[in-house]
Image (cartoon, rainbow, N blue to C red):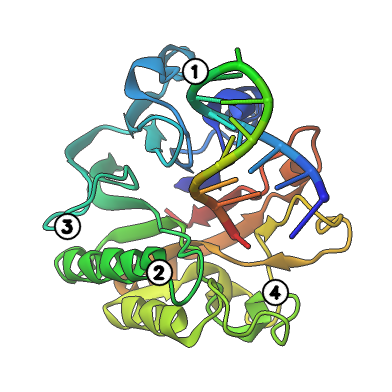
Amino acid sequence: MKILCWNVNSLKVRLDQVVEIITKFSPDIISLQETKSQDENFPEIIFKDLGYESIFIGQKTFNGVAVITKLPYKNIVFNIPNLNDDQKRFVCLDVTFEDKNFTIINGYFPNGQALDSAKFQYKSRWIEALKVFLQKNNTDSFLMGDFNIAPKDIDCHDPQKWTDTVLTSDVERNHFEDILNSGFIDSYRYLYPDDPGFTWWDYRMAAFRRNLGLRIDHILCSKNLISSIKNFEVLKDFRKLERPSDHAPILLTMKF
DNA sequence: ATGGTTGGGGACCAA
């Protein structure tokens, strides 16, 4: 089973690249963040022609998430339960692969802006609600998306420069640890303990060329799936294209 | 500094 995850920073702008990546890798599941696509404009016919169904929730201007899959699915949940939230950042569903059911959780975590801001409080509130949801969804599950958290110093090109800022703060890293402790494993870090594995580079200051990146996009597996983790790739070639997203796609391959 | 959205200029959001 192949799972692809990508913050596209506008699906409209990146549509040809998404079609290209689906054609090239034939993932079973594609999770997108920052589609910036209202539901009535979602290009589901494009994916249907490729043999995929689309499950999506968006809004004007910002946010928006989608799961695109060729697998049978059910039990769709839009938005985190018991969280008062008008931002479209969360979709969860169950898929069936070779007669087994798996839970696919796709989140676009809030950025947080600054540690002392209201947006950071919102980020913490959002993650706390997610943790509650995960307590009952931590078996045969994949939790993926743009976490907007670089979990350790190794996930950051310059930890000293990135102190007391969002994405690297202790508060956010503790949230990430809490999520792992609720029954998940960081599939990339499990396979590659010592490689940074950046997934995001700022558009500015030639950050990609200079490899000034962060690892903030993740695919976590519930612990019962550890022995089935096969391969993980950061598809940096898609960050090299013209008009790229500032995030690279990530691709997890399981043994089943 | 860069890029996307929106709306028709400039502000806001992103990380």
Task: State the residue at coordinates (30%, 72%).
Answer: A224
Q: Residue furthest left?
A: A82
x, y percentage for residue A27? 51, 38
Q: Of the residues under marks 2 and 3, which one precedes in the sequence? A: 3
> Please, which chain is the residue tagged with disc 3 on?
A
Q: Is residue A228 left or right of residue A136?
A: right
Q: Nearer the viewer, residue A180 or A86?
A: A86
Q: Of the residues under marks 4 and 3, which one precedes in the sequence? A: 3
Q: Is residue A158 left or right of residue A95?
A: right
Residue A120 — which label? Answer: 2
**In front: label 4 or label 3:** 3
Residue A17 — which label? Answer: none
Task: State the residue at coordinates (43%, 27%).
Answer: A37
Establish if A30 lies above or below A195. Answer: above
Same chain check for tags 3 and 1:
yes
Callouts 1 and 4 close, C-beta under 8 Å: no
Cα–Cα gap, marks 4 and 3? 33 Å
Instruction: Specify few, some or many for label 3: CA neighbours under 10 Å numbering under 14, 14-19, or 20 or more.
Output: few
